[in-house]
Amino acid sequence: MAAELVVATTDLAMIQAQQAGMKAIGAGLAVGLTGIGTGIAEMGIGAAAVGAIAEDKDFFGLGLLFTVIPETIVIFGLVVGLLLLFL
Amino acid sequence: MGVNISAPYIYVCTRMRMRKAKLLPREEYQRMLNMSVSEITRIIGETEYKQEIDELGTIFKGIDLIEVALSWNLAKEYQKIQEITPGNLKQFTQVYLRRWDIQNVLTILRGKMQGEKPGKIKEILIPAGSLDKVILDRMLSEESSDRIIEMLKTHRMYPVLAREYPAAKESGSFSHMENELYKHLYANIIAGAKASVKGGASFLAYIQLDIDIKNVKTLFRLREDDLEEDARDMFIPGGSLSLLNFTSLNNIKDLNEFIDMIRANIRNDTLHSLLDELKGNKSSHDIEARLTRVQLEQMEKMSKRNPFSIHPILVYLEKKKYEVFNLRAIARGKESRLPADKIMKYLVI
């Protein structure tokens, strides 16, 4: 009886550890994949913004603003990651 | 992810769009039509041509200042674009700019033949192709035309020059040689664009449009002038028209039938609407400028269809060329006291 209880407790601990690990992987994926998405989105906008700024310096502010708009994607990923880890 | 949406393509195409947006608008030309040459110089000096006007202001005066400043600016602009274009686009841009080599070499040869001073010839050269200022200066300092041809021994156009020059020199007319040089250039360009290079298809589409418009222009010119020259000599192969179509089109006397035949042979909506306008309208004096406008409009459409390809670059290069042509036409027209509406007909806006 006592031996069975010890086995069950060990199993539970293992399952809990696995769950924590899965959460960490999920959080990592959420931030990592959204980071890649943001990078791809910013590539085009950034290239166009630098092109426009090279021709006309006045575009600096506007170009920067448009370039960072896809940052929202990675921020969502970060929020999801934090929720996974701390809730 | 295809190469067509890589960052350098987006970068350079955006730069071209920005530059295109800075070109002079229609209203500016209309304002210039009511000005004197010195006022036009002042207006041009406040735009993208400021640096050239300031630099050359002490050496040249009046119409010469405008002419030289425009040529210098065009050459500088073309060199700059060659510097900033990446990969295959650079190659295509250089290929496109090779036509300036032909123009420069012919200008030098013609100038030498007429005994013009090297300084005078230099004013109208546009060193935008593969022959840069240094080579052109060396060519200008040569006295004999044969030596000039010898200097081009390593250049692509040398075989045609060597073949055609003796006859051209004897007859005193370079027109046949010019045709042959352009045919050789287009054949080369088409072979290059077809050689399975990425983005080659869009370049080929432009080249075919260019050849089509050139052939149609030649046909209209032949109709207007009633020349007895051999039409086949002026035909450029590689477009929608075949040599057979070209000669049969040239033999059609009736304007409506002629237009219908062009419509049937060349698929191009913008050209079709121009041809419809021309039907029944006997006067076709400004047809060349209108055909050029058709070409630009069609190129604009192509650049919107392929926003990150060679097309936006080519549209800018062409529009810049016509801006310089327009300004030169206005300045020259004003110098010769032509009425504004007459000058307007020569402008490509």
Image (cartoon, coloured by chain):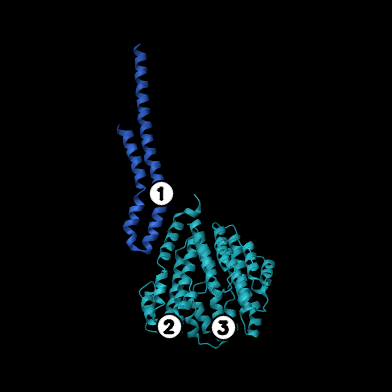
Disc 3, SS: helix
Q: Amino acid at mark 2?
A: Ile
- Letter of the blue chain: A
Q: Is residue A78 above or below residue B322?
A: above
Residue drawn where x is 50% and y is 56% of the image: B305
Q: Which residue is mark 3?
A: B110
- Seen as rendered, the residue at the extreme bottom is B115
Question: What label does residue A73 carry, if any?
Answer: none
Q: Which residue is mark 1?
A: A41
Q: Report x, y in % for residue B114.
A: 56, 87
**Front residue of B197 and B329:** B329
Task: State whether discs 2 and 3 lie on one chain.
Answer: yes
Q: Residues within 10 Å of mark 3 (few under 14, many from 20)?
A: some
Question: What label does residue B63 carry, if any?
Answer: 2
Q: Amino acid at mark 3?
A: Arg
Q: Report x, y in % for residue B162.
A: 64, 78
